[in-house]
Image (cartoon, helix red, strand yellow):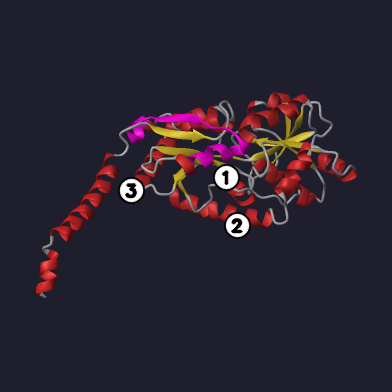
Amino acid sequence: MNNKRQLLNTPLLAGMVAGTLAVASGAAWAAEDYPNNPINVIVSYSAGGATDFQARIATSKAEEYLGEPMVIVNRPGAGGQVGWNYLVQNGRDEGYDIAAYNVPHFIAQSQMYDTHYNLDNLEPIANWGVDPAVLIVGRDSPFDTIDDLVEYARENPGRVTVSGAGLFVGHHIATLQLENEAGIELRYVPTSGGVDALRFVQGGQVMAGFNNLSDAYRSQDRLKILGIADLERDEDFLPDVPTFQEAGYDIDDSSVNFRGLMTRSGVSEEILEKLSEGAVEMFNDEEVQAQLKDGGSPMRVMGREELREMWQERHDYLEELFAGLDPEELEEAAED
C-alpha cells in the first residue's frame, strides 16, 4: 500500500496524469472552438460541371450555419481519384479539409482501382443532392424511345456508342445495367467528365449517352431524354420521361449520383457531429434549395447515419455488378 502511495506521489506519474488531462481538455476545446478558420472543400471535378455547380450553391451559407465560410478547391482528374486521394493523403484531421463526394463514383473506384481511399478511411458528413442517370440522344437521333435504341443494339451488337463521365461512375453503371437487363452489347465511351460526355452526344460523336439529370435538363432543347435510371419519375424536372422500369427494363437506382460532403478518418466525433448538423441545416435552407432547384438539381438531404447505410448498400451491390470485370481491358477497349 505504501508503495502504491509513493508511486502516486511521484513527479513522473503526476506529469502523465496532467498530460492526459491536458490532451482531453485540448480536444474538447478544439471541438468547442471549431471552426475558427475557413473550411476547404475539395471538388474532384472541373469548374462548371454538375458537382462544382451544386457544391458552390450548397455550401454558400456555411458562414451563417457554421461560423466560417467554405472555400471550393477544384482538384480534377482520373474521374475524381486525384481529389479524393489528396484528401486522404494530405487532408488535415482538424476538420478544415473536407471534400464533395459522388456516390457511387468513389466507392466503385476504390473497388476497381488501387486508390488511397475506401469506406474504411472516409467519414460522411451530409448529403445535399441526388442526380439520377438519364439516357440521352441527339435531337436528330432516330431513337425516340428506349425500345428503339435496344432494338437497334440487338440487331447491331457493339455498334451503339454510349458516352459517360468515365469508367466506374454512375453513367458506366447504368450502361452495364442496361446491357445486362436488355441482353445487348453497347460500346461505352468514357470521357473526362459529364460536360464532355454531354458534348459528345450533342456533337454526334456518339449515338447515345448516360448523363446527369441536372445537366441534361439544362440542355434538353438540344437533346432527347429517353429514360431515367431511378425508381420513380422526376415530377419536378422531367415528369414526361419514363423510368426504365416503366419501359419494361428492371433497372433500379444503383447508378443514381448522390452528392454531399465527407472528410478523412481521424477527425473527432465532436467535430464531425458539428459539421453534419450545420451542413444539414444549411442544405435545408430555403434559399439554398431554391437556387439548386432553379439550376435543375434535385435534392435529398441526409445526415451521417443514413449515409453510412447507403454507402454500405452501394458497396455491396457494386461488388456483384463488377464481378469479373477487368479495368485494364475496359480502358484498352475504350481507346480502340
Q: Is residue 8 above or below residue 70?
A: below
Point 61% across, 32% down: residue = 214
Among numbered discs 1 and 3, the one appearing first in the sequence:
1
Identify the residue under disc 1: 106
Secondary structure category for the residue under label 2? helix
Type of amino acid at the residue the image marks with label 2: Asp
Q: Is residue 2 above or below residue 279?
A: below
Q: Nearer the viewer, residue 59 or 229?
A: 59
**Image position, residue 313 (x, y; %):** 57, 55
Q: CA distance from mark 1 to mark 3?
A: 25 Å
Identify the residue under disc 3: 270
Task: Give the quarter of the figure containing the N terminus.
Answer: bottom left
Among numbered discs 2 and 1, the one appearing first in the sequence:
1
**Image position, residue 273 (x, y; %):** 36, 47
Task: Give the quarter of the figure containing the C terminus.
Answer: top right
Task: Tell me where the magenta segment starts and ends, as one range.
Answer: 63-88
- Is residue 123 left or right of 167 when viewed as pictured? left
Name of the residue lying farthest toward the bottom: 1
Q: Residues within 10 Å of mark 2 (few under 14, many from 20)?
A: few
Identify the residue under disc 2: 316
**Image position, residue 100 (x, y; %):** 50, 38
Q: Are marks 3 and 2 in contact (CB under 8 Å)?
A: no
Q: Residues within 10 Å of mark 3 (few under 14, many from 20)?
A: some
Magenta-span inclusion, residue 133: no
Type of amino acid at the residue the image marks with label 3: Glu
